[in-house]
Image: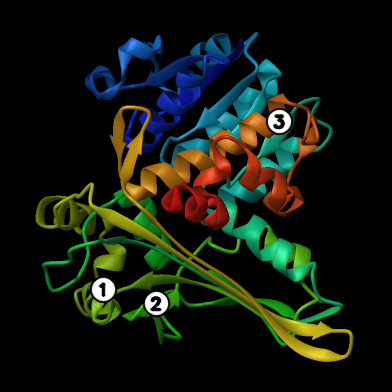
Amino acid sequence: MKEIVIIGAGKIGGAVAAMLAATGDYSVLVADRSETQFSKIDRRLGICTVVLDVSDRESLVTVLTGKFAVLSAAPFDLTGLVAEAALEAGVHYLDLTEDVATTKKVEALAKGARTAFIPQCGLAPGSISIVANDLAKRFDSLDSVRMRVGALPQYPSNALNYNLTWSTDGLINEYIEPCEAIVEGKLVSVPALEEREEFSLDGVTYEAFNTSGGLGTLAKTLEGKVRTMNYRTIRYPGHQAIIKALLNDLNLKNRRDVLKDLFENALPATMQDVVVIFVTVCGWREGRYMQETYANKVYAGTVGDKKMSAIQITTAAGIATVLDLLSHDKLPGNGFVRQEEIDLAAFLNNRFGRVYNRDAIKVKEAV
């Protein structure tokens, strides 16, 4: 059994712990600074816990030393501290961050490291980067790569058409920080919440707009190889206009604590959600202009005997799959590893990654 430390006992950290421990192949220790968070951990799976403040570098390194890997499900502003401790302890490092600055820090730490540093292992960035890069490799030359992802309530019932489904801090960060995009072959910065578009999938109309972090390292990988590339978050129509009013007209973009308090006390959480994934790549193949698309919806469901939201399932499955591939020597064991280096077929055929496999889902539904 490989010993794993998970930093953060929230919704995602707890889901990752449950997935890994249920296999019997991993010994899981969950660390969090708040002991009350451990009430959500399923002790029947043999998961251990420890109260730990990641800002206590010495204690964190002590906990990590001798382990196989550390998985950070901590808020984005603490993730860099975990990466530093992983380097000192000599353990593999994986995280779920969408924060661009944090990923750049992890990349710098990984230079010359004896262990693997793999950031952005969640949904977006994460699995969507694996999908987009696989589609891109099917072309002789590329024109456009468009990546769209949204975690939405199945039953929206407020003006925002939204319920909280994951980290409030991460959500706010996506709505405020600058976004990366490739425009006419060059990597540029574009403002969040802009370039709104509408599209329909399965008869449902959605809007999508720029948000920060979703492209991950794929932006640098494809710079100069594609004319247009962008990432946009999917919401139900009307959401963007209200968020822009809150951030700009009420100046809450400069009062994140107030915005967080509003979200967490006025927007109910829900376990009845759906994750919408829509990736479209256009380019030339054998002289013809062609298009390849991956479209999928993942709903809330039960993993083992534990009920999980769709965002828990997709995010936890993403990082669990990467860890599983790493532990079976199917990924580089040292240095910086980008999501787009991961083979899509290996990802989808993995015991955790199968939640993203549309063909496997169809077979299951037909049986």
Neighbours of disc 1 within 10 Å: few (<14), some (14-19), many (20+)? some
In what element is the residue under mark 2? loop
Among the two numbered marks 3 and 2 on one chain, the one whose residue lies closer to the N terminus: 2
Residue sitting at x 68%, y 20%: 91
In what element is the residue under mark 1? helix
Residue 170, x across and y down, in percent:
39, 52
> How many numbered tags mark residues here?
3
**Looking at numbered disc 1 in the image, what kind of residue is underneath it?**
Ile
Q: Looking at the image, can residue 345 be seen?
A: yes
Q: Distance between the residues labelled 3 and 2?
A: 36 Å
Q: Name the residue under label 3.
A: 326
Q: Mark 2 points at which residue?
A: 193
**Looking at numbered disc 3 in the image, what kind of residue is underneath it?**
Leu
Q: Are marks 3 and 2 in contact (CB under 8 Å)?
A: no
**Looking at numbered disc 2 in the image, what kind of residue is underneath it?**
Leu
Nearer-the-camera pick, 335 or 330: 330
Among the two numbered marks 3 and 1 on one chain, the one whose residue lies closer to the N terminus: 1
Q: Do the residues labelled 1 and 2 touch (CB within 8 Å)?
A: yes
Among the two numbered marks 1 and 2 on one chain, the one whose residue lies closer to the N terminus: 2
